[in-house]
Image (cartoon, rainbow, N blue to C red):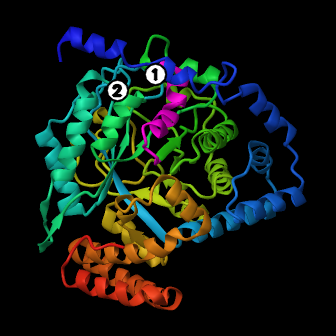
Amino acid sequence: MKTEESERWYQDRIKPDQVTRYLKDGRDFIDDDLIERQLREHAAPDPTRVRDLIQKALAIQSLSPTETATLLHVTDPGLLAEMEEAAGRIKRHVYDNRIVTFAPLYLSNDCVNNCLYCGLRRENRAVQRRTLSMADVQREVQMLAGEIGHKRLIVVYGEHASSDLSYMVDSIRTIYQVNTPVKSNARARGQIRRVNVNAAPLAIEELQVLRDSGLGTYQVFQETYHHKTYAAVHPAGTLKADYRWRLYAMHRAMAADIDDAGIGALFGLYDWRFEVMGLVYHAQALEQDCGIGPHTISFPRLEPAENTPFIAQSRYHVSDADFRRAITVIRLAVPYTGMILTARESASLRRCLLPLGITQMDASTRIGVGAYADGAAYGEQQSDRQQFLLGDPRSLDEVIRELAERGLITSFCTAGYRCGRTGKCIMDLLRTGQEGKFCKLNAVLTFREWLDDFATPATKAVGERVIAMEIDQIRARNPQAFDAFYQNYQRTSAGERDIYF
């Protein structure tokens, strides 16, 4: 792109009127002083009050910020155990025993921003910069869909003219068009069925174009909700320095009829309790202003990155114990939402955190641009190509085998999105526990697909036991749907693909 075109792209990014329309008395919905006061005032929680809040969460009712502040200060081991047990019950009620897996796909690491904590910041000369061509994108997807077996991606873009809206649209369409032979099953074809996007904030008119390209969930993470810290780590004069443009990204997405919104905070930039409060205020604002809360909440922690000393210098590192508490409270406070635990964390920690309400995990993760197709073995990381270093580089097959050994079924289902069960519709179904009736059926069908097309013998053997258990549950719990389900199951076992309810 020519220099003058790049400059025009940069100057036109932020639309002030698409922020001010959402402000109330000129203020955004994050009041730092109020949050700090709420945290102070609830520093000594009453056990009876805590148990009342647990019961409210178990009824799949969102907790208020002040109620969340109460739970954030629980330190009694017995009460924490009760909160964790409730978090697991909520997840099973809303999402059953399903875990959705996905892969992140970084398409570009060029970026105009200069975030102090990010390995891809503009001034980091130690990083190899690259934006994939459409031919490169095809090769990445052929590996992901044809050899690994993923059906769902989260596609990640840098904020840069080289990965502008037209590039995003072209890449999403390219991903959906890949229909590649499955390496381990000559009868099958690999294809991505759901493309979610993690990208910079966009204007409403751009989001409408992105929606029409086949966008799934749209993710924008606020990084930190604390205004002063946000300003300190996002230098003035950069696009990302505009706190409110980012804060209202999901409001604009809803205005563009993108009703599956993903929010998140980067734990380690400021006090973890404040960030949990920020996430809850964000979920509350979306519910109140747009009628729909967040489809997913993510909670990545700061990880080492090439030539990024800020990470080691941060005063707000989050211990594993506090991270566990944060996840538990998020599950209780926003009981309907999906919760994403990424491969930033180690395999051992992910095992421990999974029962606290996690619904989605990535696997076979490579975050270097072009890293899936370059043939590197799992576990090999190239820090000069990555935004940060991963903690869990295990293959999808390994992760699925471990989940199956714990009695969990990996779901590759994307049917709800294609049947219109999105936005308020899916939120209502999730709150009442009804979505599981559809998802249980589709989870078994897609798991059958994956076992036949991609699983190693050891994983398939464990997976077969899960399949048998799930079929028995469907027969007992959903008898009216069983005959139709089992016909589709037999068709899937015979080699048909992408059958869903």
Left or right: 143 in relation to 208: left
Q: Which residues are magenta?
A: 241-260
Circle 1 — which element? helix
Q: Nearer the viewer, residue 96 or 70?
A: 96
Could you tell me which secondary element the residue under label 2 belongs to? loop
Can residue 66 be seen here?
Answer: yes
Task: List x then y, in percent, for residue 281.
Answer: 66, 39
Residue at mark 2: 159
Residue in view at x 54 percent, y 45 percent: 299
Q: Position of residue 117 (x, y in %)?
A: 47, 28
The correct choice, above or below, for 265 with respect to 372 in the image is above
Residue occupying the point 14% across, 58% down: 179
Q: At 65% across and 49% down in the image, what residue appears? A: 326
Q: Nearer the viewer, residue 104 or 95?
A: 95
Residue beneath disc 1: 240
Does residue 394 lie above or below 15 as drawn?
A: below
Can residue 80 be seen? Answer: no
> Residue 149 lies in what quarter of the image?
bottom left
